[in-house]
Amino acid sequence: MADLSDKLQKIATEIEGLTVVEVSELASYLEEKFGVTAMAAVAAPAAGAAAGEPAEEKTSFTVVLTASGDQKLNVIKAVREINPQLGLMEAKKVVESAPQELLKDVKKDAAEEAKKKLEAAGAKVELK
């Protein structure tokens, strides 16, 4: 193990006392703040989850359109807003063939925003 300064040793001791969820939140914060990834730092504490600690919070979601509801035209518009590369006919096919995945492996905030837009248009949506 590397020799750490007193300041770094104190920080390391604090981190060791965190739960898996807290370490995950800290890693996300550091990734956003400094533009780095901490995959190795997150992977090591994850082994503690099997020992009865809470599981890590899910970080990627799939947005599934389950039903278009009564206002199909508004739902088609919302689908095109969420996925602009879809043409009008493609969006119509997606809406008419529900359940369909609209977004896959997106961050929680993007998934929540898409869900809110679709539900406002009258659709039924599920996050997985």
Image: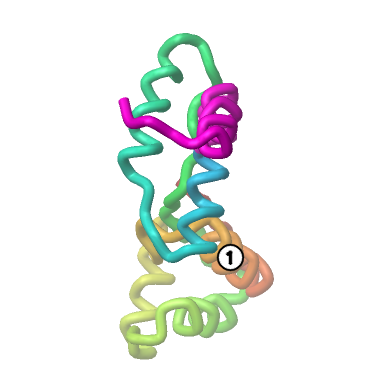
Identify the residue under disc 1: 123
Residue 100 visible here: no
Where does the image place residue 96, in percent across and percent down from the top left? 40, 70
Residue name at image x 37 percent, y 47 percent: 38
Q: Place residue 72 in its image quadrant.
A: bottom right
Specify the segment rendered in magenta.
1-23
Q: Is residue 85 above or below residue 7?
A: below
Identify the image quadrant of the N terminus.
top left
Secondary element type, mark 1: loop
Front-lying residue, 128 or 87? 128
- Decide which of 13, 57 is in the foreground and name it: 13
14 in magenta: yes
Label count reads 1
Q: 116 left or right of 106?
A: right
Instruction: Answer yes or no: is residue 24 visible.
Output: yes
The residue most toward the bottom is 88
- At 33% from the left edge and 86% from the top edge, which residue is drawn? 85
